[in-house]
Amino acid sequence: MKYSRLCLLALLSAGPLIALPNMIRLGYPNCMSCHVAPQGGGLLNPYGRGIDEAQSRRAGEYSPNALPLLQRLNFNGLFDQDFRAVMSSQLSATTNGPILGLNRGRFFYRNIATLGKGFRTSVIIDGETEPILRRPKPYEAAPRPGLVSISSAMLQYRPKEGIEFGVGRDALPQGLLIPDQTAFIKSRNRLGYFDAPTQAKAFLWGRRWLFSPFLFAPSGREPKLGRERGGGLLAELDPAGKGKTVVGLNALRGSDQLGNRNLTGIYTRLGFGAWGILAEHDLTRHSRNLAFGGGIFNQQATYGQLFYYWREWLVTSFITERLTVQAPFQERLWAYKGEVGARMSANWSVSFRAGLQREALSHVYSPVVAIQFSAKTVN
């Protein structure tokens, strides 16, 4: 049995700017109620800001900032915008190896401009002093962003409630909008915060259903071999009609110079008052071109989370993950994590995570311990 050790300490560190799927426990089956964009993430609408404040330990009433300077910066309501600055420090060590340190700073700027007649633009710019890169695989190239990048730049049109179209650069629609970038269903399916392909997509929704077809092309940040093109769809249904039981399907086909991938995933979000379940299983069939060795193999990623809210501002989660990749790129990984998160206010939160990753083929175990403080402004 082999062990590797990892210790992580993050100060004022903010995760990806996306919605939390555990809102299902309160009867929110999707992101439309609280977010400006139907896909979730980005800025909150006024109702969402009120919910954000109410779920913190302070549990106060949301009051828009009426400072004359901020009103002028927002051009009296034409813009919604905010800025987040973060700093982090990381320590890591492997068995009988040196202790390594990494100091990292990161910022986000988010802006939405309401143009009228159903049109708006949205932009998210992020930067970091030390990007944390995803490791490339022989069958999958990883993006290499610069120190400053545009993770979202969209033109959106909503002719009426329940229909929206968008073109630009953004993350692809996905079933579980979890913030953990290391989760296999994100890191192995090109759904990290560096993955923002150029795309055209539509959102159609009703009280019990959502349907989102999309087409995508390279953003230009990908390595030459990994400039993927394709399309897909996401569809979900609330069978009970109470906003607390959602089942969904996401499918995608993409092609680049390395070959093709066909992803099919099923997922569910279930809420039962104080607790709930998030689960997803994805099957990806890879077909590599003969010029790069050829071969057809499957990849499967499974994610399961059980969460419980002791208070509206205090949550505990237990997570299990599994990844299997067939030969010739065989992998078998398991991950087990426990998390505790506390939202002290709409601006400040703290979380603690401890976990273990197991490589079943090599019998290597990698413990992880992390503490995170998050700071944000409320737009």
Image: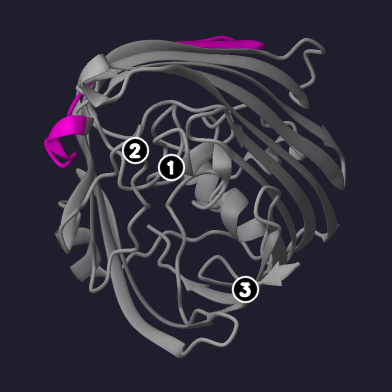
**167 on left or right of 354:** left
- Mark 2 is surrounded, within 10 Å at the Cα level, by few (under 14), some (14 to 19) or many (20 or more) other residues, namely few
Kind of residue indicated by mark 1: Gly
Say which label, 2 or 1, has the lower sequence index. 1
Q: Mark 1 points at which residue?
A: 41
- Secondary structure found at label 3: loop
What range of the chain is rendered magenta?
204-225
The one nearer the camera, 7 or 85, is 7
- Report the mark closest to the observer, 1 or 3: 3
Residue 341: x and y in percent read 70, 66
Residue at mark 3: 4
**Where is residue 347 drawn, in percent x and y?**
50, 70
**Residue lying at 48% horizontally and 35% vertically, measured from the top left:** 329
* Quarter containing the N terminus: bottom right
Given residues 342 and 192, the one toward you in this image is 192
The crowd level at tag 3 (other Cα within 10 Å; few <14, some 14-19, many 20+) is some
Residue at the disc numbered 2 = 138
